[in-house]
Image: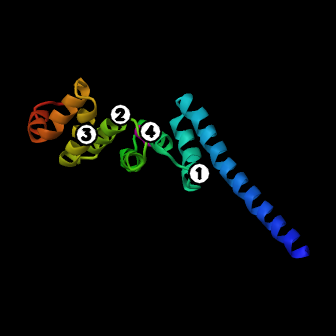
Amino acid sequence: MPIMKTMKSICVLVLLSGLLLGGRSMAQEAAGDRQYERLAYARAIPKYLKAADRGKGDADLYTRLGLSYQATGNTIEAEKWFAKALQTSGVADSVWYQYGRTMMSNGKWEAAVVPLQEFLNRKPGNVLGRRALNAAQNYEQFMQDSAMVRV
């Protein structure tokens, strides 16, 4: 009989530790959300990263990470997190657009055509999506014209 009590105790401890660790990642995500809502993107990023590192990430968390990195000017990391968001279920259509635009910011004009086209397949009448796709498909012309402008 003592073995059964020990086994029950171990099971209870394992369950409780799992709940505590899961709760900590949810708390980190909630703390990140508070910073994100205040437009404090640089402060939200570490909180979101802690939640994502604990394996509790979903499309919304990865999207907010991408948007936070984009808002802080780190388009390399933004691209990474938008791509990760697109690998999950339940992702918003707008993430396809954000991913394509971020790829364009990183100089990946030709590769940006794929997510932008997917966005337009989902939102056919979107003017910004159409313009972004046009720019990605005609980036060589865009680059030629931009040489004429001095900033």
Give the mark, 4 or 1, whose residue is nearer the N terminus.
Answer: 1
**Do the residues under discs 4 and 1 have CB atoms within 8 angstroms?**
no
For the question of whether residue 151 can be seen, the reply is: no
- In the rendered view, tell whether residue 124 sits above or below residue 11: above
The residue carrying mark 2 is 94
The amino acid marked with disc number 1 is: Lys
The image quadrant that residue 34 belongs to is top right
For the question of whether residue 60 can be seen, the reply is: yes
Give the mark, 4 or 2, whose residue is nearer the N terminus.
Answer: 4
Task: Give the magenta part as a residue range.
Answer: 66-70
**Do the residues under discs 3 and 1 have CB atoms within 8 angstroms?**
no
Looking at the image, is mark 3 or mark 1 nearer the viewer? 3
Point 88% across, 69% down: residue = 5
Q: Position of residue 111 (x, y in %)?
A: 21, 48
The residue carrying mark 3 is 118
Q: Residues within 10 Å of mark 3 (few under 14, many from 20)?
A: some
Q: Secondary structure at mark 4?
A: loop
Q: Secondary structure at mark 3?
A: helix
Question: What number is the disc on residue 50?
Answer: 1
Report, in whole angstroms, how far the alpha carbon at label 4 lies from the one at label 2: 19 Å
Give the mark, 3 or 4, whose residue is nearer the N terminus.
Answer: 4
The image quadrant that residue 70 belongs to is top left
The residue carrying mark 4 is 72
The amino acid marked with disc number 3 is: Glu
Dominant secondary structure of the residues highlighted in magenta in the image: helix
